[in-house]
Amino acid sequence: MDRAFTQLVVSERKFLPADFSVTDWETLLPYFEELKNRTIATPDDLTLWLENVSEVEAVISEDACWRQIRMTCDTANKDLEAAFTYFCMEIEPKMKPYGFELNKKLLACPFTKDLDTNQYFPYLRGVENASQIYRDANVPLQADMSLLAQQYGVISGAMSVEINGKEYTLQQAAKFLQSPDRELRENVFGKVAARRLQDKDELNTLFDKLLALRQQIAVNAGFENYRDYKFRELGRFDYTVDDCFAFHQAVKENIVPLQAMLVKHRQQRLGVDVMRPWDGDAEPAGTEPLRPFTNGTELAEKTMEVFNRLSPYFNGCLQTMRDMNRLDLESRMGKAPGGYNCPLAETGVPFIFMNAAGTMGDVITMMHEGGHAVHSFLSHPLKLSAFKEYPMEIAELASMSMELFSMEHWDVFFTNSAELRRSQLEEMERVITVLPWIATIDKYQHWIYTNPGHTTEQREAAWLTILGEFSTGITDWSGYETYRKNFWQKQLHLFEVPFYYIEYGIAQLGAIAMWRQYRNNKEQALENYMNALSLGYTKTLKELYATAGIRFDFSPAYIQELANFVKPVLEEMGVH
């Protein structure tokens, strides 16, 4: 199965000058004008025009990504923030009307109908959809929205707590919640909660501003609410609002009971009468938290070894990224929260950003982002940039499947077999626990955006009701009711990428199905995985999942089937 890793070769530019870089709109404008006004007289003309458009998109995308990467790596640097802001306010809004004109030109071209539907169908469907919902009036609103959304990272990046006389980011502080010292855990949890609540009003004000902008964008485009607009903008052609509601119900019925098994199992291991919020990641006294690595360099090296065992191709991807300084893994003050893999459209070698603090969760994040990186490499040879702009339902399948594929090789991090089993159980806990959380966040977003104009109090009440639906009810939150009411504020997706979250749930189910396939036939599963990712977005989601050897399905019956596969796996791990 192993395909050899070959170093990506950056294609020579055929339209923009080789030394061209994005500085301001005035230098870009002539190229957009030329593309808009060019005569397309033959099918070959159309092919060349599409390639030229793709080249411009790739160059601009890579420049914009670097601005965001640099800013998230150092949120305190005002020059980096200004460079990103300049792009959002002075370049991107001026590009969007030209993007609309180029889409219209493509749709009106008589040769477009002759393009190979085996490759172009999803792209052309997306172009038509984007043209239908585009409004000039929304361009400045979307620019404002991008800027406002970035403020979440600035606010969150400045959050820190003092523990034992030393300052820690909230990401770094999380490792103390794994400590066997329950008093320490409670103390740290309380400090983190208090620190988050310091900014709750500022975050509510920010969120209200974002909601108003989003609702106006929807109304401008002819939609009653932002939920319905966003479904169209995200190109959710393969499932509906009702499918999302069915997913919520199926998770409640089939996954929450598995989560309850896991919580009770931890409660038994801890030997506590009542589970409290600071007990969820803890180990019993005498059991030290897993320490899989000590720094970012070690994390990268061990991950490359794990990837090499799966496929030398996967290892080649990470080695290339390391050699090109496209890994920023360790948490530090002033760094934005979270983690991501950022594809870089022209050079093809992505960038992994994360906030590693030495925990098992960091290993899982690295496997996850590494899966995204492999996807970036596999799809990069596709001819057009648009073919590589795949939806999150397949992007997250790439990352979540990699987590589960890699588990059997985590002895690279743990030579002790008991620690290895603990790490694998921790991953299974994450896989199961994340599904009810995804259902919670997704159902909450449906409420938020179909109830425009709601108050902060109504939002808190709706959150608590929905959170309660997907909770096991085992953990006692008394004394932290105010924090729990505002717990949604820690989910950056709500601020930065609205309505993008159920994709994780769909992909997590797909990843469980991929893992089931992997356990039956490793070689075939990895071959199917790489074949699917190599297609980018040249096939529909259902076709991509079929290429991967699984179903694009999140019906109650299918979720029950996957839950029935997972339950005995948990029992094998000692969870009853």
Image (cartoon, rainbow, N blue to C red):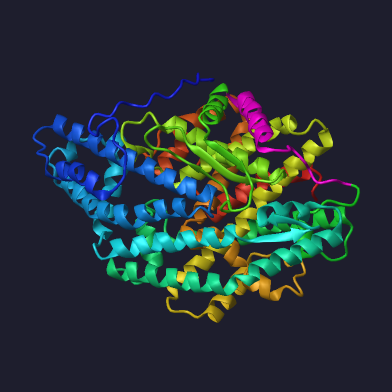
Magenta segment boundaries in residue numbering: 287-311
Please name the residue shown 50% across and 38% down the image: 351
Q: Is residue 183 left or right of residue 565?
A: right
Residue 55, given in percent of the width and then of the height, sits at: 28, 36
Left or right of 415 on screen, residue 24: left
Q: Is residue 122 above or below residue 187?
A: above
Left/right placement of residue 309 relative to residue 182 reads left
Relative image position of residue 64 (x, y in whole percent): 38, 46
Q: What is the chief secondary structure element of the magenta stretch?
A: helix
**Which residue is at the front of the view, 264 or 102?**
102
Against 235, residue 380 (above or below) is above
Residue at the image point whose x is 24% and y is 34% from the top: 16
- Magenta stretch: includes residue 122: no
Q: Quadrant of residue 45?
A: top left
Q: Kindly tell me whether residue 27 is visible in this rendering.
A: yes
Query: How many numbered marks have been drawn onto this rendered protein structure?
Result: 0
293 is within the stretch colored magenta: yes
Q: Position of residue 27 (x, y in %)?
A: 23, 44
Q: Is residue 190 left or right of residue 239?
A: right
For this rendering, which residue is in front, 313 or 443? Answer: 313
| Location of residue 107 in the rendering, given as x and y in whole percent from the top left corner | 18, 46
Q: Quadrant of residue 191?
A: bottom right
Which residue is painted at 72% across and 45% down in the image?
A: 359
Residue 251 in sight in this render: no
